[in-house]
Image (tube, helix red, strand yellow):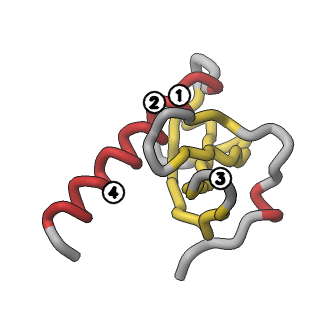
Amino acid sequence: MSNETAARQDLLIAKCVEVASTVLTDQEAIIQIRRCEPTFGRNYTNHYKVYLATLDPSGLNPINQRCVVVSITSNMDSAKVEPSLSCDSVKDLD
């Protein structure tokens, strides 16, 4: 992976965290982000599964886990949580 590609991935992940943070409750944290297959249309759209959970006082045992899908267009003009997409409906990239 070139430095330019790595930097682009870093920007996408940062945007994903920013968008996913808008749906966090006070007690929740992001515990995992998984890259998913993109969609091609007018714009190339990146999809990420973002797993959220409430952490116990030790911070080690996540409870009340849930997953949201974040979509980000290739030019990063649009980024949003997709309530119409379930995590089961998007395929992880291997």
Residue at left 32%, top 45%?
A: 11
Separation of residues labelled 3 and 2 (CA atoms): 24 Å
Residue at left 51%, top 54%?
A: 32
Q: Is the C-beta separation of discs 1 and 4 under 8 Å?
A: no
Circle 2 residue: 18
Circle 1 residue: 21
Label 4 sits on what residue type?
A: Gln
Judged from this view, the residue extending furthest toward the right is 84
Image location of residue 72, percent across then percent down: 55, 45
Query: Which numbered circle lies on residue 9?
Result: 4
- Taking depth in this image into account, of 57 and 16 the one nearest to the observer is 16
Separation of residues labelled 4 and 3 (CA atoms): 21 Å
Label 3 sits on what residue type?
A: Arg
Q: Quadrant of residue 54?
A: top right
**Would residue 58 be seen by someone viewing this image from the given angle?**
no
Q: Quadrant of residue 27?
A: top right
Residue at left 40%, top 48%?
A: 13
Query: Is label 3 in a helix, a strand or a loop?
Result: loop
Camera-nearest label, 1 or 4: 4
Total numbered circles: 4
Separation of residues labelled 3 and 1 (CA atoms): 27 Å
**Which of pointers 3 and 1 lies earlier in the amino acid sequence?**
1
Q: Is the C-beta separation of discs 1 and 2 under 8 Å?
A: yes
Q: Is the C-beta separation of discs 3 and 2 under 8 Å?
A: no
**Would residue 34 be seen by someone viewing this image from the given angle?**
yes
